[in-house]
Amino acid sequence: MEILELEALPFLLIDGDDIKDFFTRAQQIPDDIDIITVLGGVNDWNWSVQLGTFTNEYDPVVRPKDQSTFYKGMYRLAYYLKNRFPNKPILFFTPMYAVQESFKNDLNGDNKTIFDYGTAMKEVCAYLSIPCFDLAQNAGLSFKFSTYRKNYCLDNSGSDSGSKFHPNAAGSNIISHIMEREIIKIYEQFGGKWNG
């Protein structure tokens, strides 16, 4: 996060994982961390990880390893972070709209859209009282439109073919400013003083 001049933990910034891998990495977070942010859901949608349904019966104490659906993995991760870091700010970010050519009508193999995964994140976070910022609704970028793909997508051909998940430098700049604002807000809510 160059804009905020934060030191990120490189072993936690790994692309290509799903919600189950997030939990494994969460266990490596040092106790002296200042703030925890989680941006996920794209790979789960792209890989058709079964979404499942929400219930508060995923208590990791009772079922410590059940991550058979996105909801269960999300609940396990969020519960773990909230329980382990009660005095640290935690902030989740939903995935933005992404394009996967092989999905008809944006429905993956589980017949779910990327928004369903974002909704699951928001629902679990709300239940556990963890802030969750909806990037899909509030970032102002949508790779659904070829004009946005041309200007803000890593694959900026603007074509409708292929997968469009990742923003380029211009798209990342827009998203980073939005994330910066939300990170500062939650950090200060927890008593931190931002010197930026």
Image (cartoon, rainbow, N blue to C red):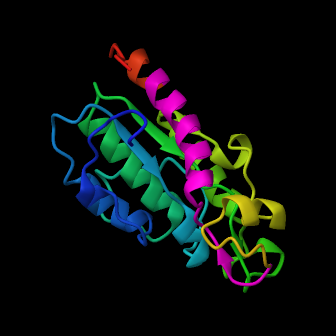
In the image, taking residue 120 as reference, residue 25 lies left or right, namely left
Q: Quadrant of residue 183?
A: top left
Up-down relation of residue 85 to residue 29 (above or below): above
Up-down relation of residue 79 to residue 40 (above or below): above
In the image, taking residue 80 as reference, residue 99 lies left or right, namely right
In the image, taking residue 22 as reference, residue 128 lies left or right, namely right
In the image, taking residue 119 as reference, residue 190 lies left or right, namely left
| Segment colored magenta | 160-185
Q: Main secondary structure of the magenta part?
A: helix
Q: Give yes or no for residue 66 being in the magenta stretch.
A: no
Residue 58, given in percent of the width and then of the height, sits at 43, 54
Instruction: Please report the residue visible at 24 percent of the width from the left and 60 percent of the height from the top.
Output: 11
Residue 64 in view, yes or no: no
Quadrant where the C terminus sits is top left
Residue 124, given in percent of the width and then of the height, sits at 53, 45
Residue 56, given in percent of the width and then of the height, sits at 50, 47
